[in-house]
Image (cartoon, rainbow, N blue to C red):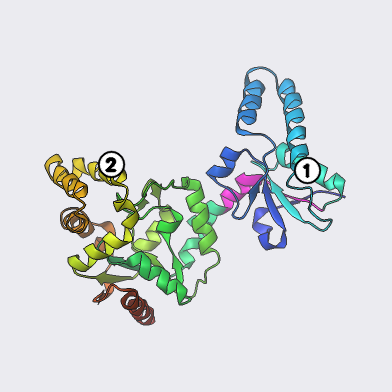
Amino acid sequence: MTIKRVKFSDIQIHDFDEVIDVRSPLEFEDDRIPGSINLPVLSNAEREMIGTIYKQKSKFEAKKLGASIVSKNISDHLKDYLYNKNRDWLPLIYCWRGGQRSYALATILDQIGWKVEVVDGGYKSFRKHIREFLNKNIVNYFLILLKGNTGTAKTRILNLIGERNGQIIDLESLASHKGSVFGSQGQKQPSQKLFETLIYDKVKNLKTGEPIFVEAESNKIGNLHIPKEFWKLMKNSPQIELSATVEHRAQFLVEEYSEITTDLDLLEKQITSLSTIAGHKVVESWLQMAKNKEFYGLVKQLMEKHYDPRYERSLLRKKKEVFAELKIEDMSQKGLSSMADRILQTAKKIE
């Protein structure tokens, strides 16, 4: 049998039973082909050790030691994860650039009798494909932005649109962040590369001829930047603005962020981070409200003194005329579902 090399741009992932990333766990965590699994042939420590020997001592010694470690790790995978794979199992394998690590596993699997394919150029070719898509192909898509002050339930409404078969991209979900100083809620965000991969993986399955609803964001969500050309497309896309009273918004946010109000240490840490913006005196009063569990009043003040002024200054607000303004009178699930229907109807009028 022979090992087939395939360009990532020519690959249909669903044709394979499994996509195997043989890079180290840290490389895999940083970014990977969507849906792939990690069967590393070198651990993080082993990869670092071999690399050091290769650069500082001897390429030959590094290759010899590396081969022995890779052989052992592949043996472990064969005795464990790969042992029960049937004869017709079809894997696609990749490493950093389609070289020694992917071919080490591919060669053994090929000798066993499985049909094996390797990504030509490895992860680097995949990353190049992502960059080209986000820099060039993204302009072919039609976005409609949902904008509005903090607490207007934009994310909830966005997902309700998705439940009605509307096309959506939930950037905050992909970024593992709710888009504000309280947005992380202790979650770890993906790397910038993985964030871009997640955007690509979502967008590539959407139709270019139909609107895609996206929540209006700044160009940064937590520590992650929205890809440049995607952000440019957002700035030039039509917008639907949602509004609600500060009282309705405050009550909604207290319920929406219920998990953070039960973690006072995290809440106090995030309030304290606003000191340089709001001033120490104001932040001290907010901290006292948090300690007293006056969450409704705290959220109301945060919106009036921090979030609403920031919204007024936001870049997207200045860059594009609003196509429609819709006021939310009812923040219940029924009311938000009705608003999702109104937005879908409104979108039909946007050319």
Q: Label 1's element?
A: helix
Q: Please tell me how crowded label 1 is: few (under 14), some (14-19), or many (20+) other residues with Cα within 10 Å.
A: some
Q: Label 2's element?
A: helix
Is residue 128 in view?
Answer: yes
The relative height of residue 346 versus residue 140 in the rendered view (above or below) is below
Q: Residue at x 20, y 57 (%)?
A: 303
Q: Which residues are magenta?
A: 115-129
In the picture of the structure, the residue carrying the numbered disc 1 is 78
x and y, in percent, of residue 120 in the image: 70, 48
Q: Amino acid at mark 2?
A: Lys
The relative height of residue 140 versus residue 261 in the rendered view (above or below) is below
In the image, farthest residue toward the top:
57
Magenta highlight on residue 156: no
Q: Residue at x 19, y 41 (%)?
A: 275
Pick the front one: 185 or 40: 185
x and y, in percent, of residue 321 in the image: 26, 69
Q: Residue at x 76, y 48 (%)?
A: 82
**Disc number for residue 269:** 2
Lateral position of residue 17 relative to residue 109, left or right: left
